Each structure stands twice: as C-alpha cells, then as structure tokens.
Image (tube, coloured by chain):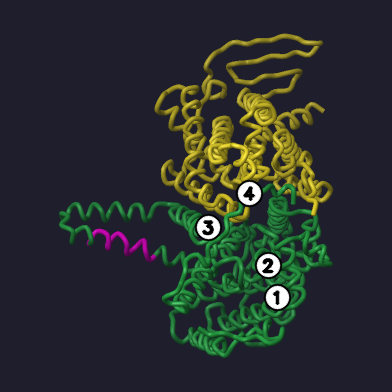
Chain colours: A yellow, B green
Amino acid sequence: MLDFIQQLVSGIALGCVYGLIALGFVLIYKATEVVNFAQGDMMMLGGFFVFTFIGLTGSYWLGALLAIVGMALFGMVTERLVVRPILGYPQFSIVMATIGLGYFLRSVAGMIWGTDDLQIDTPFSPHKGVGTGKWETTLLGVPFGCDRERAVCNAGGLVLGLDKLSVILVTVLLCVALYFFFNRTRLGTAMRATSENMLAAYYMGIPVKTVVSLIWAISAAVAACAGILLAPIAFIHSNVGLALGLKAFPAAVLGGFGSIPGALVGGVIIGVIESMAGRYAPQGWKDVAPYIVLLIVLLLKPEGLFGLRMRKKV
Amino acid sequence: MRFIFKTDYDQDIRILKHSGYLWSYGLLLLILLAVPFLVGNYLQSQIVFVFIYAIVGVALMILTGFTGQASLGHAAFLAIGAYTAGFMQLHGVPFFVYFPLAALLAGGIGALVGFPALRLHGIYLVIATIAFASIVEEVLARWEDVTNGNEGMRVRTLDLFGLPLPRDGAGFYYLCLAVLIGVILMSLNLLRSPTGRAFVAIRDSETAGKSMGIDLAGYKVKSFAISAGITGLAGALFAHKMTFISPEMFTLLLSIEFIMVIIIGGAFGLHGAVFGAIFMVMVDPFLTALKDDVPTTIASIGQSLGMAQSAADQLHDTMSRIGSAAGLKGAIYGLIIMMFIAFEPYGLYGRWLKVKLFFQLFPLYKRATFKRQKTYVKSERNR
C-alpha cells in the first residue's frame, strides 16, 4: 500500500512538471488560439538561461529571477518576429511556424551550450547540502519531518525530495495565480476577449497587439519556471524540450485546451498514469499508457475534461 | 494567354485541360524515363526518395490539403506498409500480393483512426494522430515475433514476377515512378468525382457541407483510409529502398517532415506534394554541398575586396566551423519552415503559379492577384 502511495506521489510530482509546461500551451491558446509547439523548447531554453545566469551571478535566486525576466523578453521578441507577421492566417500555418521555431531553438541551443547534459545545484537539491538540521513533528498521530541534509521530506513513511516538492508547490501556486489573473483582472478579461474575436476586441479599445505580446511574455516566463524547477531533477540538454513537450501536450489536451485548472489536472493524470504503468505494467507500457488513456478520453469527451463545449448557430 | 471556352461540365473536370498539358507532361515523362541513363547513382537514388516522399505527400494532400483534417501520424502508416512488406516477403509471399496488401492493411487501420477523428477537429485531432503514431511505434518495438523489435528487420531485394529489382537499379526507379504516376492519376480522378468534391466541401465548411447532405462521418473515414492506404504503398517501396527498417525510423520527426512536404510545396494542389518532396529530399545534399563551397567562396570574395591573406584564411576557418557545427541542419530547417509560412504561404507551387502568371500577363501582372485576405482570428471553439 505504501509503495502504491509512494508511486502516486512521485507520479504527481512528475505530472506537475507536465502541468507546468501544459500551462504555457494553455495560456497562449487561451489568449490567441495559437498552439505553440515550441513550448517545450522554450522550457529547455529557460533551463539553459538559468544555468548561465547562475554561473554569472553566483546566486540561485538571482539567476532564477534573471532567467524568468530574460525568457519573458525572449517570448516578446519571438512574438514580434515569428507570430505577428502571420497572425490572422489559418491556425495550422501558425502551428507549423512554431514547429519550425522549435527546430530552430533546439539546434541553436545545441550550438551555444553544446550537447552535453547540464545540471544545476539548488538550495534544495541533495547534492549540495546547504544547511543541516532536522525538523520533526507529529500531527494526528502521523509523523511529519524534513531533513535538510538529505533534502527530503517525509510524512508517515512517504518520502519526497524537496526539489520535487518545490515543483508541486510552484505549479499549484502558478495555476491559482493565473486562474485569478484570467478571471478577475481587467487584463485577463481583455485577453479572453481577444481570443474570442480579435477584431471586436480591437473595436472595444483593447490594444490587441500589446495583449498578444504580453501573453507570449507570460507564457515564456512560465516556461522558464518549468525549466528552472526541472533543472535539478532532470538533466538539461537541447532535446529535453521536445520529449517533455510531447508529454505535456497530451496533458493540455486531456484537461481541455484552454482551461488553466485543466492543464494541471491533465498533467497530474498523465504523470500518475506514467508512474503507475512504469511500476506495475509490463515493460513498454510506460510510454504508451498516457496516450491510450488520452485516446479513450478524447473518444468519450472530445473537448477534454474541462474544455468548453460550444456550438455554432447557423 | 490561352482562353478556354467551356461548354459543358465534362470539359470542366477533364484532367488534360488542353493540348499544352499533353506536351508539357509528355516531355516531363520522357525526361524522367531517361534519368537512369543520364545521372549518376547517387542522384538517381535521391530521385527515388523524391518519388516515395511525393507518394506520401499526395496521400497527405488528400487528407490535409483537400479534406482539411490535419495528421501528424503518417509515419505510422508508412511503418505499417513497410513492415507488412518486410514480414510478408520473409514468408515467401510474392510482391504483387503483398504490395496491395500493405495498402489495404494501412488503409484499414487508417479507417480505424478515422473513427475517433469524426468527433475531433483542429488541435485535438493532431494530438490523437500523434498518440496513435506513438502507440504504433511502441507496438513495432515490442511485437518481436513479427517485427524483430528494436533490432530492426532486413528486407530482401524486391522480386517482381521472378525479376529481381535491386534498390539502386533502374528497374526499381521505374517501379517507383510508375507507382507515383498511378497514385497521382488515381487522386486526380478521385478529386474530380463526387467524393473529391465532398472532401473539399468538408474542408471549407463542415456545417455547410452537412446541410448540403454530405455524410461527414463517411467521407472523413474514407479520406483517412485512402490517405493511409496510399502511404502504405509508399511504405512498401520505402522498405525495399532502405533494405533495413527499425521502429526508430518512423518517429514523429518523420511525420513532421511529411507535413513540411505539403506546407513547403503548397497545400492546395497535387503539384505541391511533388514540389515539396523535391525540396525536402534535395535540401540535404544541397546543404552539404553549400557547406563545402561557401567558406571558400566567401574567403575569395573577402580577398578580392582587399583583405589580407591571413584574415581571409581566418574568415574561411570561421565559416567552415559554423558550417560544420552540429545541428546546423535543424536550424536551417526551422528557418526554412518559418520563412515559407511568413513569406510564401502558398508554397513552391504558389510561387510557380505566380511566375507563370507573370509571363502570361506581361506587362499587366499585379501583385495583388495573390494577396491573401487577412482574417481576424475568431474563436475556433465556437465552430
């Protein structure tokens, strides 16, 4: 039983990484109805940025902040150069353009940072014990504790690395913040309006170009967060974005493209299925199981779990 | 400029619109028939790959270009065709049996994929085809009795009625050419039939098509099956051309390459599939040639502009270092896709039409003839 729950927890941690990348897909889709296939590669670039900035500044937190800002700027530049010239043309051509962008980013990153695997040390990764000390307590008869030296937390026998815990926390926080941003703020409403009908939004006085530019910046910043959080867990190399992007994409679709909580839920479902299939199913099912579940869900609910179903009246 | 006065519908849907078609395509056919006697082994082999890519391009054009259903899973259909050919040949089935069987099997599985596609559109369909392709890839790697797993499968020389057609020989070239011509003629015929018109109607507006009495489900499944079947044919040829097939040859990247074929060629006519195939296959040797020649050329230009010998040498070294950097090909691929979509959305075939019209109308050509109407994005969710 404990083994099962342990698999569940590590699946959730993995799923949150997918969810975080899926969040980037969803944001751009929500505001412009563009599907950005280069989202995984932007995450990869964010990972390389944080590696470089930590090297330059020597501080993890400053490096992470600079990487997020740098990626936001990068997102705006990408929007200006790649997306804006073709905005308003059929969706599929924009998808192809972002696939091209992905190719371009992968090989340029490979040329700049080389093809070796890079890894960064963080205040909560086990390689570099920043502090020692333990903290233990008992709540409702279940022992809880944190061990800074080994960088793990445990709760009633379950063990979870601090680095993975940070992924879960940041993902949930970002989801909640962005959800309220889209549904409660003026700018969020403007973004939703833009996605419904650009021309009408423009007539209503919404600066459509700025809105689109901003959403690319936000999405790239979210990708940078994913890269920063992933860097201590997995190695960063130029192809990591493609592999993870391909897992995050089903997550976004499963949750229903365009729904922020859907991205998180979809990511967690994909992550848990993958982790369970890797543990309990025969070899080879690990990579396929998420896709099979995805196909079944799409057959039953073609608009995903949280997608909006709308019909056009003729 | 030629004006054709059409008097009946049969004339409108005729494949050879006027006698000029006969001359130009006849000449092209003669040149293609003469190719094995004219060019070297390497180029001939590349042209065979152009034929195979063009067959897949035509298949994808029917599905994506004419029916409007995107697919990023065509590498899987190619794999099904290739493995059917390899497996059947291993068990002594003759070519004229397993070649159509490869198409039938791929087509049947394509129809099965078409069923979920009935309820999906846009990005959901793309992800469903990606999911299907990954499942097929994994099955190929795991079903070791049939596919020999990750170790891959050797495919023996093609044997046509007792006549061996080695992969580099002229015979194989003619076979691929014949299959390509057959597929193109079949597709042209299909597209001028009621089925083809139904496909185009579905692409342009599902709602309008439905209200005209078009059976959306039936035609979508048909489109998927036909497209997958043709890709299966290409797969059988591909297996014989490669002589060795393994699951990692049929990944998502190959599917993306096929989509690039029709995007670069121009996704609105069968010509586009052929143009795109030529481009995608030939860009590789072209880049390799550039890698060798460009540094020397740039250095000599620098020298003729009064650069010192040492500086010119340095320039040459820098250029060749950039040229041989790992992954440069990917960057150039990416740039090509982005630039085609931004500057030439009609693809190579569109450019061809523009050049042709320029000379036909000279000096009255207007750029605005081909200007695309920008439509402001309205939500596809409300479709």
Indicate left or right for B308 with A98 as reference: left
User: In the rendered view, would you say B133 is above or below A262?
Assistant: below
Q: Position of residue B254 (x, y in %)?
A: 59, 60
Residue A151 appearing in the image: yes
Q: Both on one chain, marks 4 and 3?
A: yes
Mark with earlier residue (2, 4): 2
For disc 3, the neighbor class at 10 Å (few under 14, some 14 to 19, many from 20) is many
Q: CA distance from mark 2 to mark 4?
A: 22 Å
Q: CA distance from mark 4 to mark 1?
A: 30 Å
What residue appears at the point 77 percent right and 42 percent down from the top-left corner?
A308
Residue A134 versus residue B52: which sits nearer the camera?
Answer: B52
Q: Position of residue B155 (x, y in %)?
A: 63, 71
Indicate left or right for B109 with B261 as reference: right
Residue receiving disc 4: B377
Question: Of helix, strand and loop, which mostly describes the magenta segment?
Answer: helix
Looking at the rendered structure, the kind of residue marked 4 is Val
Q: What is the chain letter for disc 1?
A: B
Residue receiving disc 3: B341
Quarter residue B53 falls in: bottom right
Residue A239 versus residue B268: which sits nearer the camera?
Answer: B268
Res B191 label:
1
Disc 3 on helix, strand or loop?
helix
Q: Position of residue A146 (x, y in %)?
A: 65, 15
What residue appears at the point 73 percent right and 22 percent down from the top-left corner?
A158
Q: What is the chain letter for disc 2?
A: B
Looking at the rendered structure, the kind of residue marked 2 is Phe
Magenta region: which residues?
B289-300
Mark with earlier residue (2, 1): 2
